[in-house]
Image: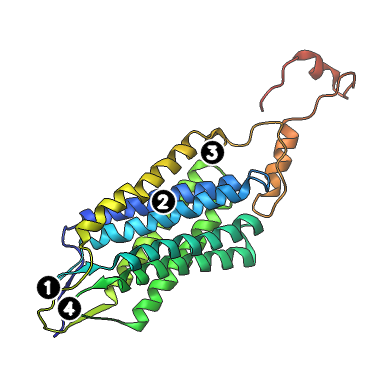
């Protein structure tokens, strides 16, 4: 017997909240990725690891908030705890691989394609591994074509988000990238759910595992608390908002545009005492450096 699947049991509440969670995790993670491109190599792994954990926690939380509105008629839905939290680990590790590639090789060319592909595959792996943790009186099957479309959506949008984060052009670029990342996660999720079919066994054996309500508490206490801490780190880091301070050289790396370094060199020349420039009138007019 084929079961009736309902993915919007609470209307638009769960999709909207899930999308906001995906955007929050994406905003923090991609901003940390942008931040890593402004520091030396000794600090870069820490920022990239923080960004990976933020994105992984965000998409995992998004998935199970969306699953709160998922029901199947005539059978209760339970979740295997081990498989559920294994999907969180897979998301963080695979997203981390993609972010580290972009963080060290730059957001362009083969590095961007490879990093975006791995990040998108991490999003898809988290989703389908989380779905594999479902326990119910039936069997889940998927439409192969729709599954492939969901994976392509995740890879394409993740690549676009990493490209935007790698431009190092300010806070608004990171916000736009997070919206794209949130779209990638939610679009992939609901496309994957559209590929789902449930065939019920018709037995009376109860499914084992935790209910969706029982998973809500660890979701809020664990990943959401981490996202809050990551947000505090981002908010109180002055370079995240104000940019690179004047006078500090920026290490040349593939993710940073060359014109950024050149413009800083022109706007902030080094003053040598006793050295006369070709424009002495400008030099005598003001003794304080001017921001142009």
- Of label 3 and label 2, which has the lower sequence position? 2
**Which of disc 4 and disc 2 is earlier in sequence?**
2
Residue 121 location in percent, x, y? 46, 69
Of badges 3 and 1, nearer the viewer stands 1
SS assignment at label 4: loop
Q: Quadrant of residue 246?
A: top right
- Whether residue 221 sits left or right of residue 169 in the image: it is left
- Asked if residue 50 shows in the view, the reply is yes
Neighbor class of circle 3 (other Cα within 10 Å; few <14, some 14-19, many 20+) is: some
Locate residue 282: give its quadrant.
Answer: top right
- Disc 3 to disc 1, C-alpha distance: 48 Å
Closer to the chain start, of discs 4 and 3, is 4
Q: Earlier in the sequence, mark 4 or mark 1?
A: 1
Q: Residue at x 30, y 49 (%)?
A: 220
**Can you tell which mark lies on residue 240?**
3
- With respect to residue 180, does 229 lie above or below? above
- Could you say which is closer to the camera, residue 248 or residue 87? 87
Which label lies toward us, 4 or 1?
4
Q: Tell me what residue is drawn at x 67 percent, y 43 percent.
A: 260
- The residue identified by callout 4 is 137
Q: Position of residue 57 (x, y in %)?
A: 40, 54
Query: For mark 2, does the 10 Å Cα neighbourhood hold few (<14), some (14 to 19), or many (20 or more) residues?
Result: many
Label 1 element class? loop
Query: If you read the primary sequence from the N terminus, does the residue marked by circle 3 or circle 1 appear first?
Result: 1
Which residue is denoted by mark 1 in the rendering?
A: 73
Instruction: Between residue 244 and residue 140, name the one nearer to us.
Output: 140
Q: Is residue 39 left or right of residue 80?
A: right
Given residues 152 and 37, the one toward you in this image is 37
Real-space Cα distance between discs 2 and 4? Answer: 34 Å
Residue that badge 2 annotates? 25
């Amino acid at each position: 017997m084929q079961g009736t699947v309902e993915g919007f049991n609470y209307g638009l509440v769960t999709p909207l909240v899930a999308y906001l969670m995906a955007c929050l995790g994406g905003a923090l993670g991609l901003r940390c990725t942008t931040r890593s491109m402004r520091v030396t190599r000794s600090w870069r792994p820490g920022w990239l690891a923080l960004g990976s954990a933020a994105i992984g926690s965000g998409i995992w939380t998004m998935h199970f908030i969306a699953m709160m509105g998922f029901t199947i008629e005539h059978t209760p839905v339970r979740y295997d705890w081990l498989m559920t939290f294994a999907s969180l680990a897979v998301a963080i590790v695979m997203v981390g691989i993609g972010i580290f590639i972009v963080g060290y090789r730059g957001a362009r060319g083969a590095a961007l394609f490879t990093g975006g592909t791995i990040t998108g595959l991490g999003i898809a792996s988290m989703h389908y591994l989380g779905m594999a943790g479902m326990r119910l009186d039936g069997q889940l099957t998927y439409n192969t074509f729709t599954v492939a479309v969901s994976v392509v959506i995740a890879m394409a949008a993740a690549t676009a988000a990493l490209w935007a984060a790698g431009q190092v052009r300010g806070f608004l670029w990171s916000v736009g990238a997070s919206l794209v990342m949130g779209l990638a996660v939610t679009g992939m999720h609901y496309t994957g759910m559209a590929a789902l079919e449930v065939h019920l066994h018709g037995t009376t054996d109860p499914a084992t595992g935790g209910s969706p309500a029982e998973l809500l508490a660890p979701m809020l206490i664990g990943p959401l608390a981490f996202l809050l801490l990551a947000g505090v780190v981002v908010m109180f880091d002055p370079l995240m908002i104000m940019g690179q301070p004047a006078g500090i050289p920026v290490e040349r790396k593939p993710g940073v545009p060359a014109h950024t370094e050149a413009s800083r060199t022109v706007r902030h020349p080094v003053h040598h005492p006793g050295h006369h420039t070709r424009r002495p009138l400008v030099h005598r007019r003001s003794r304080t450096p001017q921001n142009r």
